[in-house]
Image (cartoon, rainbow, N blue to C red):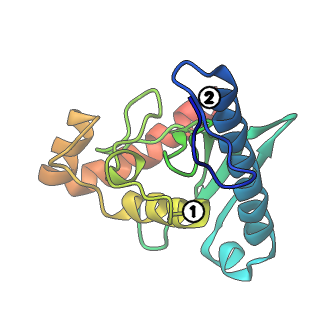
Amino acid sequence: MEQNTLPGMNVGVVGDKSKSTNNMKNSKQVRSKRLHAELSALLTDPSCMSAGISAFPDGENFFKWAGTIHGPSDSPYEGMELKLQMEFSDDYPLKPPNCKFTSPVWHPNVDMAGRICLDILSEKWSAAMDIRGLLLSLQSLLNDPNPNSPLNAQAANQWVKERESYNLKVKEHFKSKSAK
């Protein structure tokens, strides 16, 4: 059976492993190219430094990054340097990176393991988003939690009902857990 195709057009057949292998190879190339561009932008954009955000590959694995967010001014996180890790799947930038804080964070939308509840890390992610925007969103989340969607119900309750106590707990939690 002959197929009408344009010259150079690769037509895959159901069950054709070469097509799925090529798609996987292409997605990895897209991920790699995109991350190189984002890293370059993060390293050269002076607004990143002034905003107190940074990210770069963590060791030998270019698809696992270490990030830093300085706590926002006039927040209980002010003066803190919060560390996080980001892992990029083969589907990046179509899917968000897997992010979690490695520094201790007392927050309604961060659980004790550092996992983060933020809509742009799931259903609201768009391929148009980048790491700079993600880091700025996480920094903003620190000062503006969503207690209606908590991962840490105790922190959410404290943030809503006992703000001063919450602010003290943020600092105490960071200091006590960071010292270990």
- The reply to whether residue 29 is visible in this rendering is yes
> For residue 146, what is the image quadrant?
bottom left
Instruction: For label 1, count other residues whose C-alpha is less than 10 Å away and answer few (under 14), some (14-19) or many (20+).
Output: some
- Judge by depth and name the residue closer to the eye, 24 or 38: 24
Give how far across and how far down residue 98 sits, in percent: 52, 38
Q: Which circle's residue, 2 or 1, is located before the other in the chain?
A: 2
What percent of the width, then of the height, locates residue 82? 59, 50
Image quadrant where one finds the N terminus: top right
Q: Quadrant of residue 169?
A: top left
Quadrant of the frame with the C terminus: top right
* 174 to the left or right of 125: right
Report the residue that reaches farthest toward the right: 60
Q: In this view, does 90 lie to the left or right of 144?
A: right
Of helix, strand and loop, which one carries label 1? loop
Image point (22%, 56%), residue name? 163
Q: How far across and down, in percent of the image, does residue 167 sit?
A: 34, 54
Instruction: Check residue 130 in the rendering and tell me which mark sits there, or answer none.
Output: 1
Assign a secondary structure to mark 2. helix
Q: Which amino acid does label 2 sit on?
A: Ser
